[in-house]
Amino acid sequence: MMDVLLIADLHGQYGKLDDFLQYDPDAVIIAGDITDFGPLEPVDSVVSRIEVPCFAVPGNCDPREIVGVLEQSDAVCLHGSWISLGKITLAGIGGSNRTPFGTPFELEEDEIEALLSGTIEHMERNVHNILVSHAPPLGTLDRIGSNHVGSRSIANHMDRFDLVCCAHIHEARGVMEVGGVKIVNPGPASDGYAAMIHLGEEPKNIKIELLTV
């Protein structure tokens, strides 16, 4: 069993990080919006507080320059890339599809499609295959009012994974399953929300626990 802490949407509020780490995870995933339109200077010191392997993607509220900051930090930046860790393969896509707000890290759907399809083409299949995406797949944990605002391109590729870790829509905290694929939005870490993902030895043996600190 491997326990992975999933946090997202910190929006520059890092005071609860130590409380999350008290759950003693084997690894940490950060699914974007680490900052709130910057600044980027604290990111490296925040990541350095995590003493287990850390994997991150940027969010739409992060300046695009955060990719370089993450790549130079103790975290592994998964934006447009993948990595295997034991029985887990992690792939990532940061930013989000277009929003009405013109936030710093938004992508066209064809950009998301190109990044994801290129990553999937080369990634190593594993016991557990996890997509870390700031934006949710269209139609899953992506509702604002009566509107679904997730990414169509992410939805098109989600069946290549066993688990999708997403964020972005603060109101859509939860866990659901579509076609045998689990999707989790841990809720905003700025409000004390996170999730613990328990990964078993066998394929599809994935249990998710929503946390509040």
Image: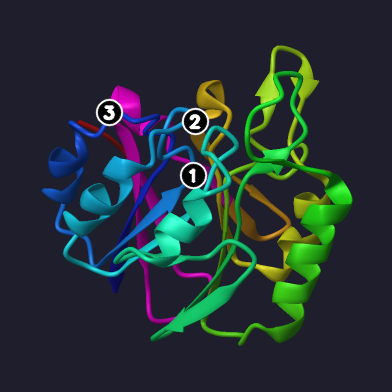
Q: How far is mark 2 from mark 3, CA to CA? A: 12 Å
- Residues under numbered marks 1 and 3 in contact, where contact means CB atoms less than 8 Å apart: no
Three-letter residue code for mark 1: Gly
* Earlier residue among tags 1 and 2: 1
The answer to whether 87 is drawn above or below residue 61 in the figure is below
- Residue 161 image position (x, y, % from top left): 65, 67
- Residues under numbered marks 1 and 2 in contact, where contact means CB atoms less than 8 Å apart: no
- Residue 147 image position (x, y, % from top left): 78, 19
- Residues under numbered marks 2 and 3 in contact, where contact means CB atoms less than 8 Å apart: no
Label 3, residues with CA under 10 Å away: few <14, some 14-19, many ≥20: some
**Quadrant in the picture for the N terminus:** bottom left
Label 2, residues with CA under 10 Å away: few <14, some 14-19, many ≥20: many
SS of the residue under disc 2: loop
What label does residue 32 carry, if any?
Answer: 1
> Can you tell which of label 1 and label 3 is closer to the viewer?
1
* Earlier residue among tags 2 and 3: 2
Q: Is residue 89 left or right of residue 2?
A: right
Residue that appears at 60% across and 72% down: 81
Q: To which quarter of the image does residue 24 belong?
A: bottom left
- Residue 117 image position (x, y, % from top left): 80, 70
What label does residue 192 carry, if any?
Answer: 3
The answer to whether 129 is drawn above or below residue 114 in the figure is below
Residue that appears at 72% across and 45% down: 137
Label 1, residues with CA under 10 Å away: few <14, some 14-19, many ≥20: many
Residue that appears at 49% across and 30% down: 173
Q: How far is mark 1 from mark 2, CA to CA? A: 15 Å
What label does residue 173 carry, if any?
Answer: 2
> Can you tell which of label 1 and label 2 is closer to the viewer?
1
Q: How far is mark 1 from mark 3, CA to CA? A: 15 Å
